[in-house]
Structure formats: C-alpha cells, structure tokens
Image: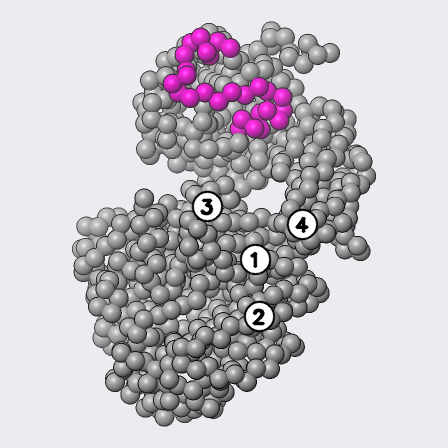
Amino acid sequence: MQKILLYFILSFLSFSISQAQKPVTPSSSEVFESIQKLNFLGSVLYIAAHPDDENTRLISYMSNHVKARTAYLSLTRGDGGQNLIGPEIRELLGVIRTQELLAARGVDGGEQLFTRANDFGYSKDPEETLAIWNKEAVLSDVVLAIRKFKPDIVINRFDHRTPGTTHGHHTSSAMLSFEAFDLANDKSAFPDLLKQASVWQPKRLFFNTNSWFYRSQEDFDKANKNNKLSFDIGVYYPLKGMSNNELASLASSQHLCQGFGRLSQRGTQKEYLEFLKGDALTNNDNIFEGIDTSWNRVKGGKAIGDILYAVENNFNFKNPSTHIPQLMEAYKLLQNIEDEHWKTQKTKELKSIIEMCAGLYLEASAEAQTSTPNQSIKVNIEALNRSTQSVIIETIKQGDEQTISKNLELKNNDSEKFETTYFISNNEAYTSPYWLNKKGTLGMYKVENRELIGLPETPKNVVIDFNLKINNVPITISKPVVYRYSKPDKGELYRPFEIIPEASAKISEKVIIFSNDKQRDINVIVRAGRDNLEGFVEINHPKDWNVSPEKQKVNIVHKGEEQMVTFTIIPPKNQSEGYINPVVHVDDKAYTKELIEINYEHIPFQTVLLPSESKIVRLDIKKKGENIAYIAGAGDVVPESLQQIGYNVLTLNPDAINAETLSRFDAVVVGIRAYNVVENLEFKQQILFDFVANGGNMVVQYNTSRGLNINNMAPYPLKLSSDRVTDENAEVRFLNPTHPILNYPNKITLKDFEGWTQERGLYFPNSWDAKYTPILSMNDKNESPKDGSLLVAKHGKGYYIYTGLSFFREFPEGVSGAYRLFANMLSIGKEDLKPASKLNN
Ligand SMILES: [Zn+2]
C-alpha cells in the first residue's frame, strides 16, 4: 500500500522518478522555477560517505529555495549495507543504491557525484578506513569533484574533529573534504587532474551540525549557536504545493533498500551550519556573502542577465513559448562567453528551458530493449513542436558518423514520426556500471577511463542528436535512445536501451563445497544476446581440479533465450580451493561475463555485467551427527552451507518446536538476530534447553542487545555488548587450546582463521556466567582483548554455544576454516555417536 501511494505521489513530480527514462513533461511553474535557477549563479557541494547519509532537507532547501546548483558527493555507493527489498548484496546493492540516490536527487533537485571509494563494511575509525581505501586516490577524487563542480560553498555532513564517534567512513568523508578544500586550488596538488578541470577555491566550508552530534537534544538546545548559521528549512513552495521538508521526505524515502520509506514532515524546522574555514561571514544570514550570484559574475554575463531577468520578471505562465525569441537571443550571447565552466553549465540549463518552453517532444525509441555490437536496430523517432515558434530539424545524427538529412519544419502540434536504422559498431561498449568493469580492491573500485571518475553512472552511448534551428538559431538537442513499451496492467513503460554481449554465462551456485573427493555435476546457463547463437562452453579451473567434458556445444535460436549445459567437477584428494569460470566461445570471441538484471519500480531497470565465477572448495572436514534443525532469524545462508558439507538441515518454525520433533536432531542452529526478529521464540526456550540437557547441541549466532525480545536467551547468564572485531585479519589467540571444540573432530589451527572476509565478528558478550568457557580472544588495533566471540557451556548432557563470529559472512565466501570450526560446534560431545559416513563405507 505504502509503495503504491509513494508511486502515486511521485508521478506528480516532473522529474518522474519511477521511470527515470521517461521524457520530462514539465508544467509552466516548473519551467519558471528552472528559469529562476538559471538566473542564480552560485553552487553548493554537500559531502558525506554513504547513500542515505545526505541531509535531503538542506539539499532541497539549497536547490529549491536558494536556487543554487546543488550536488551531493557520496564517497561510496553503499555496497556494504543490507538490502531490505531483495537479494542483491555487495556490488549489486551499490548499483541499486546509486540509482536510489539519483532518484532522491530527481526529487530534491540536486545532482549526484561519487568517488572510487568502496563501502567495505563497518569501520570503527578513519585511520582504518583510510588505510583500506587508497587515501590519496579518494582525496584526489574529492579534489577532482571540487575542481569540476566548482562549488562556492562546501558542506560536510560529519565532523572531521571527532574520530571514533561514528562510522570511520563518515569521519573520513569530513577529513578528506577539509583537506581537499585547500588542495583544490593548489596547482601542485594532483597536477594530473588539471587536464580534466582547472583549480578552484571554494569560498567557505561548513559542518552541518545537529543534535545527533551532541549528547542530547537538550545539550544541543543549550549549545552556543552564535557561530552557527541557521535556516528554516520548512519553507513552503506554492509553485509545488509542497513544503521543503515534505519534498525532502520524499527524496530520502527513495532509499527503500535501506528501509527509509517514511512519513513526510511540514512546518518550521531549523538546520545549522558551523563555519569551518574560508572567508568568514560578517553576519550570519547569507552563506553566499561576498559572492556575486547574478549574471554579472561572468564576463559578458550582464547582457545575458538583462534578457533573462526580464523573462523571469514577466514570465508568461499561460504561454511560455512567447519567451523563445529572448531565450534564443540569450543562447547566442552565451555561446560567446569565455568562461568555459559557466558556458557549459548554463548552456545545458538554457537548452532544456528552450525545449520546455517550446513544448518540444523529441524521442528516439528502439524496437527492443537490448542489442549487441555489430548489429543494426530500428529506432522510432518522434518529433513535435507544440508552439507557434519556428522549429526546423536540419539533420539528425546517430553517434559520431551516421547522419540522416531531414530539413523538416516542425509545424505547431503536427507530430512527425519516422523510423531509422541505428548501426551499433563493433567496438561499442556494453551498458554496465563502469566502476564494476574491472576487479577492484576491498577499498577501491578500479576505473581505467579517468574521464568517468566521479560520474554517477555510465554515460548513455547510444544517442540521437537533433540538430535544430529555432527562430533561425542553430541548437542541438541530444536524446539517449530508450525502449518504450506498454503493459496492459501497468500502462506505458520506459527502460534504458542497452548494449549487451552476444553471450553470457552463469553458474547459479557461487560457492561449491566438496566435503570429500566425490565428483559433482554443475549447470552452466548460457544466455544469447542475439538470434542464432552458436558456439561452445568450456570451464577454466585450477590445475589440481578436473572438469569433464572439456567442451559443451551451445546453439540458441532466439535472442534472450537460455540453454543449460552440465559439467562434472572432480575435486583433488586434499584440501584446496580456487575459482571456476565458464567461458563461451562464439566465432573467435570469448565471453566471460554473467549478465544480471535488477528490476525495481522506484529505479530504472539495470543491467550489470560481472565476471562469471564460482568458488570451489575441497574441504578437509570431519563431522559427527547428521540432522540439524535450523531456526531462521534475520536471514543467513547457514542451512544451504551446512547441506553443502553433508548435513541434513530442516528449518523449523517456532510453532513446530517441541520435544518430540527435536528428538530427531543432533543439533539446533539459531539464525542471526533470531531473538531480535522472531517474536514467539521466547516461549520455546525451555524446550530448547531441555533438548540440550538431553544431549543435543545448540548453537546461537549473534543478536543485538538493543531490541532483544527475550530475557532467557541462554541457560546461564550472559550479557551482550557492542564489542566487535572489524579487522578480518585480526590476530586470533586460543584461550583454551585443549578444549574439544578446537580439537574434535577437526584440529583447529590458526590457519583456519586465514582468508576470513569483512570482519571476525560482532556484538560479542562482554560478561558471562562461570559455566561458560571462552575459547578465543581477539581485538582490533589499539583495543583491549575481546574474549566473548565463542562461549561454550556444558548443560546437562549437551552443549550450549553462543557465538558472535561472522559465520554468516564467511560461509557464502567459502572460507574453509569457518566450516571446520562450525562442524566442531555441531559435533562437540558426540564422540560416541557413530559417524554417519561410516554407514556408507
Ligand atoms: Zn553512513
């Protein structure tokens, strides 16, 4: 319901959010607002770390009330977050969150910028963050953003002076911004960037403080605000029929994968800016003090301003097209000014206003959503002039070379439609997020084409240029080719037109565990990007593994169809791991990518190409017991992972937990945060503890102390804390080396803690009853040892185990030590149990 309502509201906004490819069809009031913005020559850059960090109230206020060109520089794309709306995590989540930011900016009127920094997960302090990011590279990207955008005002979301009080990415964003503020104007700093943009000195830097940065609202209310600038960001916009904060709520509600859908707010609300550096203000009421934000700012701008202010002051809401002659005059003058930055930016704005005022409708829509290089595609062109102004299409250009001569006069409201053929050249790049084209590091994306650094998304490369003459002034309006279609139950829909490879392949299982040397079959799904695809597939694999057969033929008749081929994987005798990659050979080309589609209503359809690979792991693992009951929590892949190493796993609903059912199992595993999210579990605790007392094992994974639904999580007291070890390589010390859990049936060594990913664990207990034995000690740099990551208590004949170790992160990455330790947790105390495997021998 909420989703439908949101969709409904958004459809009223001119920059249609849900279908970002849909042509903009603004009303007169929106045209007028664009002219107001055209006539304000000042800009604001807001800087933070993640998608959803940004204060949309302030961005919207700067963009819609002050009329400044406003952008949000998010250092990362938020790959490390969780996803509340679907299965995408990591880089695919980053793709969704990038589009959510663009959707938010579509609502609040801002622009969106990024750096190459990757959100690698939680970080306690900026020192760690900047060691994992390449500090110099991210700083260079912030400097580049400032030199390209040329903001007058920079605003930090976070405080650069308080490391350790918030996520390390947050503080780092403020520290880098503080440093870049001066470097951006220093020719000797990052001289390579000067090819892309000239030096620039922003006028002043602020910190957007609020009560969150104080101990309480009371403390904040009491704090001295003399040195702070404040704004009432609750202003009402009659032209929009909305308050600024209502608009801001709509913008931040775009972050749906983070659960940011929220109620709107209205009425007076204050925002505060603390001055950090630059030119000090003499009175605290105008952040642009001392900057001429009129057209006089630009050499040659006065004459342009004279025309455009007159248009603004006498705007014809009933028929904006009457302003076309003046707008074309201003356009001509603008082409002659020397300042490249202002010329480029204002030309872009003015072109769009001219298009809007003339009621121009220019569209290029392909007959299909995708095509491959070296193919031709039919494109339908629609061109319409809804004004009495003279508009002539001189030529239409496709890409760099192909030109259709037209010389067609667009008469008032007389729609011109025609079909053309667009040839997609052999070297045309695929449509996929540019930052994922090459494998990066934990902390950084790798971007080879430096021109792309900072851009929110890959520029659309299939474009139609309409070379027009409006009132005899030549002007070019470019439109990316889109795919327009309709669905009976949805109406008209748009998707981006995309270039995809002829062939792509995927293996559904991303990690394949071999707990013995038995061979296994895997399926490779090949998808055709064009009709009549013929070729063969082979599998690249590590030397000590074997794959048969060597090749499998594929023959797919229709574009978009898939064919499945099967290979047998033969593991080595000993522990080993590596990657397998399916390669599709077509003619003399080899295709190694998997094609992933992301389809949500609030963002445009996305196609992502990633290297097609699966991890294969031959584990040296022993286990006792056979049947595991799993109680689901907030979601982890523990059941699938335990099945991969040969356990039978059955997921039990809390309702199904009773003594008789449990008697069929050797152990019970509780999913992550189950006691936070499953409400009726507390009534089953006694039954579970009795199961342990009778000889069963119970493994409980991490829960958070906040929002715990239960008092009796464990049979003996333990207290959860926020202790976590975020360094996945942090040293592990064995507190109790002879404890069975480290010795049976698998001998656990330090080697089992190698190759862990993202973190060691989180929310460890920090005090516990003497009945528990702590097994491991570990800590992040400069912190005290944390001993609560793995606690084992004998309870009756069985064992209760509480662990904050991040098995839920390690299993999907095929980390062998995590599997071996988990097998020991399930097997402890079961020395007498006949091993299940023995029955087969
Ligand atoms: Zn954040």
Q: Is residue 112 magenta?
A: no
Residue 81's label in the rendered image is 3
SS class, disc 3: loop
Q: Is residue 74 above or below residue 279?
A: above
**Which comes sooner in the sequence, label 2 or label 3?**
3
Q: Is residue 309 visible?
A: yes
The answer to whether residue 134 is above or below residue 779 is below
Q: CA distance from mark 3 to mark 4?
A: 38 Å
SS at circle 4: loop
Q: Taking 527 as reference, is 163 left or right?
A: left
Labels 3 & 4 near each other (Cβ < 8 A): no
What x and y, as percent, mark residue 419? Answer: 57, 70
User: Which image quarter: residue 739?
Assistant: top right
> Which of pointers 4 and 1 lies earlier in the amino acid sequence?
1
Which residue is labeled 4 in the image? 558
Q: Nearer the viewer, residue 54 or 163?
A: 54
Q: Quadrant of the C terminus?
A: top right
Residue at left 59%, top 55%?
Answer: 436
Vertical placement of residue 585 versus 413, above or below: above
